[in-house]
Image (cartoon, helix red, strand yellow):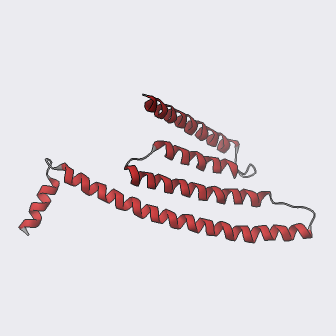
Amino acid sequence: MGRFTKQLRRFFSPKKDEGFLQFIEGIEIIVAKILSLAMVGVTLFAVFELIIFLIQNLSFEVRRLSEESNFHLKSTLFEIFGLFLNILIALEILENITAYLKKHVFQVELVIATSLIAVARKIIIFDLDKKTGIDLIGLALAIFALSISYLIISYQKTKSNNH
């Protein structure tokens, strides 16, 4: 028991922060690896869902086209685009996690790019019949703010690379 308390004292000693910081970094790496595996699972599930959706809905639309002269693929296409962008967002999040595992820092530029994709997805699948103009203005402001942030970070990055 004395050995355990000695280890605890050394671990929590203010003079020896390196051991504690290594312990915390180890936990961060384990959590990041678990998140990576979870994102791979989510991405594979999303791809599977997209394939099922494509098979079911496009075959239904083709049957309906052969029966009717009206071809209403618009809502189905928006759902397909939304599912594709969900997969793209999942891949970007996975890229964020793997970039963290490689460099042990969050790459803000990558996070903002992922956010831009997510907001762009919202705009692409935006239904004017169900949403208001305020919703669209909010999305526009989000795109504007994220774009400015991305430009500032890109500018700072190129400026620091040139010097």
Residue in the image at 56% along x and 64% along y? 43
Q: Quadrant of the C terminus?
A: top left
Residue 109 in the image: x percent, y percent?
A: 49, 42
Q: Kindly identify the residue that appears in the image at 61 percent across and 58 percent down.
A: 86
Left or right: 35 with respect to 71?
A: left
**Residue 59 falls in image quadrant:** bottom right
Label tally: 0
Residue 32 is left or right of residue 158, and the answer is: left
Locate residue 93 relative to residue 135 in the image: left or right: left
| Quarter residue 79 falls in | bottom right
Q: Is residue 104 above or below residue 58?
A: above
Residue toward you, 159 or 15:
159
Camera-side residue of 133 and 6: 6
- Residue 73 falls in which quadrant of the image? bottom right
Residue 12, horizontal then vertical, whole percent: 16, 54
- Percent coordinates x, y for residue 6 in the rendering: 9, 61
Residue at x 15%, y 50% (from the top left corner): 16
Expressed as whole percent of the image width and height from the top left, the position of residue 140 reads: 64, 39
Q: Closest to the observer: 10 or 102?
A: 102
In the picture shown, does residue 109 fall above or below 72? Answer: above
Look at the image and tell me in which quarter the N terminus lies.
bottom left
Q: Residue furthest right?
A: 69
Outermost residue toward the front in this view? 162
